[in-house]
Amino acid sequence: MLTKYLHKFLTAPITSNSPRMVFWFSLSLTFAAIYGILALQQAFSGEYVVQDDARQHVFWMQRFRNAGLFSQDLIADYFQSIAPLGYTAVYKIPAAMGIDPLLLSKLLPVLLGLLTTGYCFGVCVQLLPVPMTGFIGAMLLNQNLWMQDGLISATPKAFLYPLFLAFLYYLLQRLLIPCLVKDRDLGLFYPSLVLVCACLLILQCCWDRMYLRSQNRRDYLFCAAGLGVAILVLLPYVRFLRICPSNHGG
């Protein structure tokens, strides 16, 4: 009897509104929150504690509060010039309301971690409709992310995790508009991942079960719309391209 109950609780497929789904999802978010709290303890352990990557990608944002800072500082100008538009807006809008960018960079990872966990759980359950699968996937991802500098830095790389997982989640559910919105958001925060999304959209048209190409016209609509969004969001970055003249020895 106990074995049968454990099998049902741990491995039996369920529907989205099942209490077991809510339990495992809540447990996943709980562990993500614990990781976030531990990170906050480190972030606020001292007055001058700043994450390594934040010292490069966030320090110049003090200009949002005082435009005269870092005058003629080429390093600050460089990091400001390469900052993606969406990433800059995330810090610029709160700075206009008096929120210090460095303080915000310490708080954002907790929110990003929870969003990443939620979408990771959803993607795993979409692939295998067993809630424990989502919990294990979310736990492994959290263990990996919080041991590295990507998520905790609140730099552009930190935003790619929730945005890319959200894109995968909506793609698996074949929800066109949310999928395109996340494709656009990736272009505003981490443009190079837009190319990965475009490849995924193309691949879904090239394989459908036993067919060498998809038999579903909706897949082609997804692909065309996604490629269109990818081109639009990448256009502003074309200005960074420079054609360097070749030096020919004489």
Image (tube, grey):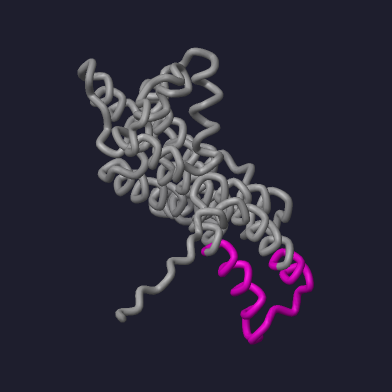
**In this rendering, would 144 be left or right of 119?**
left
Residue at (35% x, 26% y) in the render? 70
* Quarter of the figure with the C terminus: bottom left
Q: Image quadrant of residue 33?
A: top left
In the rendered image, residue 147 lying in the magenta stretch gets the answer no
Residue at (44% x, 50% y) in the render? 132
Q: Which residue is situated farthest in the front direction here?
A: 250
In this figure, what is the number of numbered marks?
0
Identify which residue, 196 or 84, lies in the foreground: 84
**In this rendering, would 46 be left or right of 72?**
left
Residue at (36% x, 35% y) in the render? 76
**In this rendering, would 81 be left or right of 171?**
left
Q: Image quadrant of residue 223?
A: bottom right
Residue at (67% x, 64% y) in the render? 227
Q: Image quadrant of residue 203?
A: bottom right
Height in image: 199 above or below 146? below
Q: Main secondary structure of the magenta part?
A: helix
Identify which residue, 51 or 73, lies in the foreground: 73
- Residue 228, horizontal then vertical, whole percent: 70, 61
Identify which residue, 87 or 46, lies in the foreground: 87
Can you see residue 31?
no
In the rendered image, residue 220 lying in the magenta stretch gets the answer yes
Height in image: 190 above or below 98? below
- Residue 114, horizontal then vertical, whole percent: 46, 35
- Residue 62, horizontal then vertical, whole percent: 40, 23
Question: Which region is colored magenta?
Answer: 196-223
